[in-house]
Amino acid sequence: MPAPGENLRINSARLWDSLEEMALIGPGVAGGCNRQTLTDADSEGRHLFKRWCEAAGMTMGVDTMGNMFATRAGTDPDALPVYMGSHLDTQPTGGKYDGVLGVLGALEVVRTMNDMGVRTRRPIVVTNWTNEEGARFAPAMLASGVFAGIHTEEYAKGRRDLEGKVFGEELARIGWVGDEKVGARKMHAMLELHIEQGPILEAEGKTIGVVTHGQGLWWLEITLTGKDAHTGSTPMNMRVNAGLGMARITERVHQIAMSHQPNAVGAVGQVKVFPNSRNVIPGTVVFTVDIRSPEQGKLDAMKAEVIRAAHAVAKELGLGCEIEDVGHFDPVTFDPGLVEVVRGAAERLGYSHMDIVSGAGHDACWINRVAPTVMIMCPCVDGLSHNEAEAISPEWAAAGTDVLLHAALEVAEVVA
Ligand code: HGY
Ligand code: MN
Ligand code: MN
């Protein structure tokens, strides 16, 4: 006997076409995407998303951080809405699906509800959060962080990219400063569909990840100051080599993460070397340490050990050392009731599923502070993400969006 609504499925071909069309905006150089936040490509993608939402009968609202909210009316306009979405911005060498699947999957849910003539008591709001990636302007999840009261709008709008451009000015330049107060919107629930960005689901042969938790994160920006000097004529014992210091600290970060296994990761991803000339010993380096764990104790211990190690290496080499927190959130526990809704939807739809902890950070991690929140994940090929070769199958995309549809129907309360 089929479960109630088991035959309710999204239109997989329409979803896939939308993913492919969005991927043409801000194309990468190797088949992925480079649609970095607040670039002209980001703006073009936003306009396309807005056109699609309005064509689906939704009304678009935008707040002063550029967060986009497309509303499908419910039968009870006073009921708190169910939000679902993710982000359209990508890494500089990003994939087509990181974030985008969550936004366009939510749009597909609304398109499917329209096709079926389904009405819900609660309004439904499809969301695009500004600057989830934090690649151009640190930290990650910046605008959802302002929405959740983690950052002030002033702090966020003052953030600078590597060229010194200012967030607030870039948002104004692309014309996406809205008129809504950030965080004024109240939510009944927030659902985020996202690719796993790791290898677990594929390796376990599971189609759906029921995300119970998200791991916590620290981004520590370390500035080491030594002395520019000739790489040829400066004796080894007279060098004050900031590049050497960075190399030693990078190795220590790896060792510290390995010493806290399982459930701990650490790496250095962004490096700026000055003067970055082949025959000059680097006098200054600025680099970001990314450490994460789902266990608060491990996360705190790793942060303390990295800071200690950095100062010890700097002292050993006679370097100046400054460390700044440029990103942080504690491990996240998603709403158990919504987790059960997602698990039940996967079960009803007959999709294999498993509970999973999110390795990556997501807007849902911040929104979880202000509303009951849950995530749904689908696999990605070889677990690869933040790489232009990021790939998913249409079947995985459809399965995740089917689960999002059923969870939304349940949480937004279908009206017969
Ligand atoms: O860094 C993260 O985990 C996310 O992809 N921004
Ligand atoms: Mn993402
Ligand atoms: Mn990402």
Image (tube, rainbow, N blue to C red):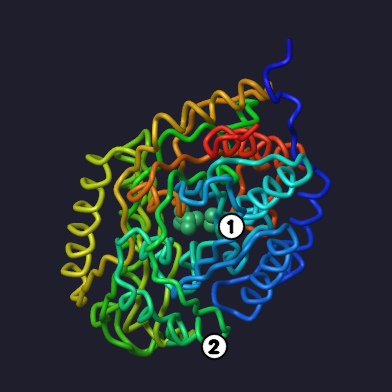
Picture layout, residue 198 above or below residue 243: above
Circle 1 crowding by C-alpha within 10 Å: few under 14, some 14–19, many from 20: many
Residue 267 falls in which quadrant of the image? Answer: bottom left
Location of the C terminus by quadrant is top right
Q: Which residue is mark 2?
A: 173
The image's mark for residue 50 is none
Is mark 1 in CB contact (under 8 Å) with mark 2?
Answer: no
Q: Nearer the viewer, residue 78 or 252?
A: 78
Q: Is mark 2 within 8 Å of ligand 1?
A: no
Q: Nearer the viewer, residue 395 or 324?
A: 395
* x then y, percent, for residue 271: 43, 71
Name the outermost residue toward the top.
1
Residue at 30% x, 61% y: name it.
150
The image's mark for residue 71 is 1
* x then y, percent, for residue 59: 62, 64
Q: Which secondary structure lies at badge 1?
A: strand
Q: Amino acid at mark 2?
A: Arg
Task: Give the quadrant of ligand 2.
Answer: bottom right
* Alpha carbon distance from label 1 to label 2: 26 Å
Residue 260 falls in which quadrant of the image? Answer: top left
* x then y, percent, for residue 305: 21, 51
* x then y, percent, for residue 126: 58, 55
Q: Amino acid at mark 1?
A: Thr
Q: Nearer the viewer, residue 150 or 250?
A: 150
Picture layout, residue 346 above or below residue 112: above
Horizontal side of 92 relative to 240 (left or right) equals right
Residue at 51% x, 44% y: name it.
191
Horizontal side of 251 relative to 108 (left or right) equals left
Picture layout, residue 391 above or below residue 32: above
